[in-house]
Image (cartoon, rainbow, N blue to C red):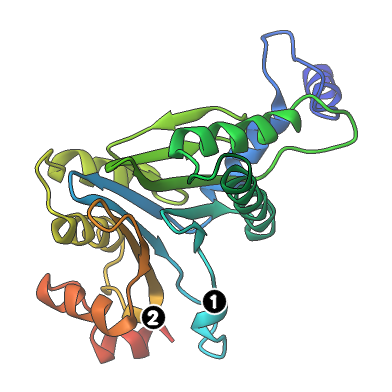
Amino acid sequence: MQGQAQQQAYDRGITIFSPDGRLYQVEYAREAVKRGTASIGVRTPEGVVLAADKRSRSPLMEPTSVEKIHKADDHIGIASAGHVADARQLIDFARRQSQVNRLRYGEPIGIETLTKEVTDHIQQYTQVGGARPFGVALLIGGVENGTPRLYETDPSGTPYEWKAVSIGADRGDHQEHLEENFREDLTLDEGIELALEAIASTSEEGTAPDGVDVATVSAETERFVELSNDEIESYLEANDLLATEDDEQSEE
C-alpha cells in the first residue's frame, strides 16, 4: 500500500520525477496513443505515404467525419494516433508555423524544422505545472528539396526519423510487417500497398475503402494528395485486402 501511495504522489504532477527518473504522466500519455487506431508512414525514393485506420464505431457515423490524416502545408501531411482533440491542436500549431515560415522567409518550411517546432511545443507541456502532456503521437511526412522525409513525434517531445513506422494500436504487429516487407527501392505505389497490407495484417475481415485514409506526397510534384475511396478500393482489390460484403455485414 505504501508503494502505491508513493507512486500516486509522483504521478499527480507532471513536473515531478519519480526516484527512478520517470515522468508517469508522459507514460500515461503514451498509453493513450496505444489505445488510438493505427496510423502508418512509409518513405520511398518517390515520396511519402501516410495511411490511417479510421474504422467507425457505428454504421450510423459518417465516415468523412473521422479525420486521421491532415494537410499541414502543400508539401506536408500529418497522421495521428491517440486523442483526436489533442491532434487537432498540434496540427493547427503546425499549420501556423508553416505559414509563418512562408511569410518570414518566402519559402516552404523544412520537414525536420517543422517536426522540431512541434516537438518543442509538446515538450513544454512536460515541464509546466497545471498542464498535462498531449496524449497523441504524430507522423509528419513530406518532401524537402526533392527528398522525402518521415518523422514521428512522441508525447515526451522527442522526434524520430523513420523509413517506415506505425503508431497507435497493434504497433508491434504492424512494425513487424513493415520490417519484413520494406525495401529501399519501393515505388510510391508499392509504398501504398505496403501501408495498406500492414493495416490489414491485424484484421481478419479485410479492409473497407471507407475504413482507411491514404495520402501521399510525391517527390516529383512535392504536393500533398489524398486518395479517393475508389482509388483506395482499387489498391485493396489488387492486393486481396478488400472486405467482402459478408464480412462487412458480420462486423455490423
Considering every residue shown, the one lying at the far top of the view is 19
Which of label 2 and label 1 is nearer to you?
A: 2
Read off the residue under disc 1.
57
Mark 2: which secondary structure? helix
How many C-alpha atoms fall within 10 Å of the one at disc 2: few (<14), some, or many (≥20)?
some
Q: In which quadrant will I find the N terminus?
A: top right
* Quarter of the view holding residue 21: top right
* Quarter of the view holding residue 245: bottom left
Q: Picture coordinates of residue 152 (x, y %)?
A: 45, 38
Q: Picture coordinates of residue 6 (x, y %)?
A: 83, 18
Can you say whether 144 is above or below 200 in the image? above
Q: Residue at x 61, y 34 (%)?
A: 117
| Badge 1 amino acid | Arg
Label whose residue precedes the other's in the sequence (2 or 1) = 1
Q: Picture coordinates of residue 162 (x, y %)?
A: 33, 35
* Quarter of the view holding residue 237: bottom left
| Badge 2 amino acid | Asp
Observer-nearest of 231 and 16:
231
Considering every residue shown, the one lying at the far front of the view is 106
Observer-nearest of 156 and 114:
114
User: In the image, which disc is placed on residue 210?
Assistant: 2
Q: Picture coordinates of residue 239 (x, y %)?
A: 12, 70
Q: In which quadrant will I find the C terminus?
A: bottom left
